[in-house]
Image: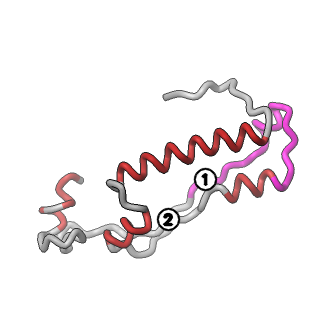
Amino acid sequence: MSVKQDTKVRSMQELQEVVGIAVNYCNYCLCWFLKGHPSTEASALLGRGESVKTLPRIVAGPAMKAAGMDITPEMQTMVDGMFYDTFSGTKIGRNDPCPCGSGKKYKKCCGRDN
């Protein structure tokens, strides 16, 4: 899938629609990857602890100004509020018991695919 580089967003409503489509696509892919479990439930099932991963900040600026749009602080705040900036989780060791509850080691059960 590719996105045309000369695509221009003409209004805030178009930006919201595009972001909504992208979010729905990401949520669908995540739901498929987690086999239907909500991300919070999957995290609890996997017994993940705390670690932090920072996501890039989307700046509503140069591209929008080039398209002739005025960027207000409210618009930037809205774009910033659409995305979270941390992910919590720790890696399961290969010799740890499998979090699925089978009683096997992770490397012999769910970790086999990794």
Q: Secondary structure at mark 2?
A: loop
**Colour mapping used in the image:** secondary structure
In the displayed structure image, the side of residue 82 where residue 93 appears, left or right: left
Which numbered circle lies on residue 87? 2
Asked if residue 107 is positioned above or below residue 57 in the image, the reply reads below
Q: Secondary structure at mark 1?
A: loop
Query: Residue at image x 60%, y 53%?
Result: 56
Residue at image mark 1? 56
Q: What is the three-letter code of the residue carrying label 1?
A: Pro
**What is the x, y in percent for residue 27?**
48, 50
Q: Residues within 10 Å of mark 2 (few under 14, many from 20)?
A: few
Which numbered circle lies on residue 23? none
Query: Residue at image x 67%, y 49%?
Result: 58
Query: Residue at image x 53%, y 46%?
Result: 24
Q: What is the three-letter code of the residue carrying label 2?
A: Phe
* Residue 8 covered by magenta stretch: no
Distance of label 1 from label 2 (alpha carbons): 13 Å
The range drawn in magenta is: 55-74
**What is the x, y in percent for residue 42?**
36, 65
**What is the x, y in percent for residue 29?**
42, 46
Closer-to-camera residue (79/114): 79
**What is the x, y in percent for residue 90?**
37, 70
Is disc 1 in contact with disc 2, using a CB cutoff of under 8 Å?
no
* Residue 63 covered by magenta stretch: yes
